Amino acid sequence: MKKIKELSKEEIELLSYADLAYMILEETKKKMKINDLFQQICDIKELSEDDFVNQIGDFFEILTTDKKFTMLENGFWDLKSRHSEKLIVEEDDEFEEDVEETKEEDETEEPSIDDTYYDEDDVDDDTESDLKDLVIIDEEEEDSM
């Protein structure tokens, strides 16, 4: 790969901001703030200060969407290939305590009638035996009692 200084003006014009940013970070081998990085690109492409101001937002979007770049702490940017991603898994002690408390509550709590599920197919068909002691009373008989 050619170095930026070795590129012709025509080659530079054909390069995207992302390509130039990649080349700059690769050649310098150090992380950079977005303003400094884009200022170097503007200098290489011979863009004006107005171009810098008008296009810095677009450049930020390019860096955030291009998977070759990574944003570091304090607003620095670098090539993702130079940084391994660390997956930090923190255990939430409060969550674990809540789960344990819930388990203890569940174990001691007896189900209420509303919590019980009845499947009509599983119910024994002993309706005759359940109804043998049933007495039907008319309203007239009830009044006389």
Image (cartoon, rainbow, N blue to C red):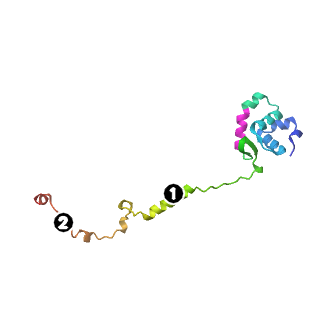
Of circles 2 and 1, the one toward us is 1
Q: Give the range drawn in magenta.
A: 55-65
Residue matched to label 2? 135
What residue sits right under mark 1 in the picture? 98
Q: Where's the C terminus, which quadrant?
A: bottom left
Measured as percent of width and height from the top left, residue 80 is found at: 75, 48
Amino acid tagged 1 = Asp
Q: In which quarter of the image is residue 106?
A: bottom left
The three-letter code of the residue at mark 2 reads Val
Where is residue 86 shown, x and y percent of the image?
A: 70, 54
Q: Is mark 1 on a helix, strand or loop?
A: helix
Vertical side of 61 occupied by 103: above or below: below
Quarter occupied by residue 46: top right
Q: Is residue 121 left or right of residue 95?
A: left
Report helix, strand or loop for mark 2: loop
Q: Do the residues labelled 2 and 1 touch (CB within 8 Å)?
A: no
* Label 1: how many Cα within 10 Å (few below 14, some 14–19, many 20+): few
Relative to the observer, which residue lies in front, 139 or 36?
A: 36
Q: How far apart are marks 2 and 1 (CA)?
A: 52 Å
| Magenta-colored segment: predominant secondary structure | helix
Picture coordinates of residue 31, whole percent (x, y): 78, 44
The residue depicted at 48 percent of the width and 59 percent of the height is 102
The x, y position of residue 82, in whole percent, is 78, 50
Residue at (35, 61) in percent of width and height = 113
Tell me: residue 145, above or below residue 1. Answer: below
| Residue for point 36% across, 67% down | 121
User: Which numbered disc flags the more N-terminal residue, 2 or 1?
Assistant: 1
